[in-house]
Image (cartoon, rainbow, N blue to C red):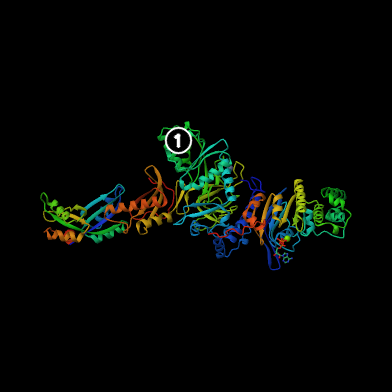
Amino acid sequence: MLQIRNLKCYYGGIRALSGVSLSVSQGELVALIGANGAGKSTLLQAVCGLLPSWEGEIQFDGKSLTGLKPPAIVARGVSMVPEGRLIFPPLSVLDNLKLGAYLRSRQKDHAGVQQDLEKMLDLFPVLRERARQNAGTLSGGEQQMLAVGRALMANPRLLLLDEPSMGLAPLVVRKIFDTLTELRKTGLTILIVEQNAQAALEIADRGYVLETGRMVLAGEASQLLEDKEVKRAYLGKDYSKFYEGRG
Amino acid sequence: MQAEQISIFIENKAGRLAEVARILSDSDVNIRALSLADTSDFGVLRLIVNHTSRARDVLKDNGFTVRRTSVAAVEVMDQPGGLLAVLDLLNGAGVNIEYMYAYANPPGGNAVMIFRFDRMEDAIELLKNNNMRILEAEELSGI
Amino acid sequence: MAVPGFPENPDSQQRSQHQLERLQETLNRAYRSVPFYQAAFKEKNIDPLDVGGLEDLAKLPFTERRHLAENYPYGLFAVPLRDIVRIHTAPGEGQAPSVSGYTAQDLDLWRGLVARALAAAGVNANDIMQIFLDPGLASWGRGYKDGAEELEASVIPLTALPLEKQQMVLKDYKTSVVVTTPSSAEELCQGLYAKGINPNELALKTLIFAGEPITLEDRKVIAGKLHVDTWVHYGLSEVPGPAIAFECKAHEGLHVSEDHFYPEIINPSTGEPAAPGEEGELVLTTLTTRAFPLIRFRTGDRVSYIQEPCSCGRTLCRINWHQERTDNIVVIKGVKVHHAQVMAHISKALGFTPTCCRLLAGKKGDRVGLEVWLGMDETIFSDEIKELEKVVDNVENALIQELGITARVRLAEGEVECAEPGRREVAP
Ligand SMILES: Nc1ncnc2c1ncn2[C@@H]1O[C@H](COP(=O)(O)OP(=O)(O)OP(=O)(O)O)[C@@H](O)[C@H]1O
Ligand SMILES: [Mg+2]
Ligand SMILES: [Zn+2]
């Protein structure tokens, strides 16, 4: 469904992605993990058309996304839950959700939007409780749910999430990730970027490991969870007491 | 005092011996004495010829591996026990014979045997002291 | 071993996406973790990020067998030793052997690959599989054992039993599948006939050839004598990879496991890609291996692509595996013997390096072995037979002692054809 080949992104003279290739098939939940500054967000932004320029090839459903503006990409069926949620605090929860369907509203799909709004409120009952509250009054976890709900309101076929677990308590993270698993069961394709490798790989089918702008590993999520290198670098297991030499 | 022999390596297959003979004859080299030692796979052909250097060169040119070896050509009385006398003498002095063979048409009536000893000089000294005649190189090949 | 995220038989676009991803990851890891690869890339002024497509692989330097020996023992490992769970040794080029390591995941992967190849030959849980390989192929023996166990077949692992005992096992244990090399199969066949065992008394139905290519005629003869179906597997001894390419039921060439190994065919003299359909040297790059990545490894094996899609439906590309080799290697019962390595031992035994030497797969008595033709020259030559016989004995003894190879040394007049060493020729 999503095919990225040889993606290179620059911030001024600095290369943030050095020829990265990645793919997500229909119905998959794929995790992209990596340390701070590895380039994970940069990759998602390139897919969503948020970077002024990039090199390489990004295809969605076999068609290139080169040169498309963000709304056009959303229209193709790609939505993102950005890093730090980026909800609009002064607006109500409902209005925030409706914003996610902005394009559809313009296309006068009011019935569809209303229907999906109900769906979101079913998916996240806590949002129904606080539907008329200002989004700024929500807890971190609730804000994250709102951000996911808002992205889903665009009715995407591919959902991108940038560090949904950031700053959340483990229990809340579990709840958000459970929701993702549910969504995935409905046929939604998901690419999730995470520093919390453990949580992401536990729900993912496959995973990729990005290291300073370069892809160094990929495989089944269950394998990556068992991978010694992944464990050392991303799963917080301390192996430093072991001998590091190589003969 | 020592005579010169050339040895040639040949694979044990048909026609090799004839090939050597043909090459030598084409170069007007005459074979004076010849011995072939062989195994199932290969053989060593040993020759005394009238033109040793030329023989060696033409054989080498034809791809053969050739070596020159010093041997002793010893005159053996053409009578019963003639060879035995020589062998006894050497044996008594502890000289070993690596190989020996007969010379084809010796000058004079007596037989001539070609010997390769493990200690060439000692052996020749011994034979001479016992009045055995050892043919000079020219005497052998010059005929 | 299906690839996660990709269908069992992906179309060419999906295949190339998968291959490119795995290739780039492999290059990045190798460059980061293996000084040898980093140095080789830098020497060519190449960064892994310059490989933006599969076709860019051609810009990268080759890895040759000698590099494996030069980096003895652990120099080419891409993970710390504590991640390694198995270490294999294969006879290398020259004095040092080549050592390869495997992480637990690498072993899983191999098990899956071998199982896939065996399954393509119809092996299943009902089979009793006997592994009859030269002890020099012990690491393949383990690979086959693991792969067959994955399919829940009953495995009789590789043991150093004499031929007679192997025959007893074959008959009494009702072996249905034998994995062996073509030359060992021939020995087995002759042995059975010599003992008057009728192939009809055997449960044997499948014979899998590994280790060396086999001609169609030889194959027909063995298949006919033993009343079996035969299958060919291609592998490398440097990695315990007995099933890098395998035959399917169509028996038209071998499917390459290109989801785990990226194949190239090059002109062995120029190093350039061979024209489509043209014969050349097989070059392999590992795509999923963790501990011991190989980048553009020159196999020395001569192959050509089969262009048409296979009737079995697999989309893995197919090759024909040819008899000749492109390097100085002789294959004796599947064990690769390198010219340089044999020469090193011959030189040591002689006390000097012979000017000319030719190596062939041959026979000593009824045993398959190495035939060494030493070209006669003035250094070796003696006018005394016993000296020459000593040369033969010394060399034969050195080879059996140092390499475990039964050798027959023959002395040749003058120059032997060294120009085309290593061809698999059976001496008269
Ligand atoms: N707007 C920008 N201007 C300049 N450099 C940037 C910009 N955004 C990101 N970078 C740099 O690009 C690199 C990749 O950043 P990116 O945000 O994609 O990483 P990340 O993997 O998402 O990290 P994190 O886990 O911290 O979110 C980093 O070195 C970062 O400093
Ligand atoms: Mg980020
Ligand atoms: Zn097929």
Secondary structure at badge 1 equals helix
In this view, which residue lies farthest toward the front? A241
Measured as percent of width and height from the top left, residue C395 is found at 36, 53
Q: Is residue A19 left or right of residue A139?
A: left
Judge whether A194 appears above or below C199 on screen: below
Name the residue rendered at 14%, 58% in the picture.
Answer: B127
Name the residue rendered at 73%, 54% in the picture.
Answer: A192
Ligand 3 - quadrant of the structure image: top right
Judge whether A33 appears above or below C229 on screen: below
Measured as percent of width and height from the top left, residue C102 is found at 56, 52
Look at the image and tell me in which quarter the C terminus of chain C lies: top left
In this view, which residue lies farthest toward the right? A132
Image mark 1: chain: C
At label 1, the amino acid type is Met
Label 1 crowd bin: few (<14), some (14–19), many (20+), radius 10 Å: few
According to the image, label 1 marks what residue? C168
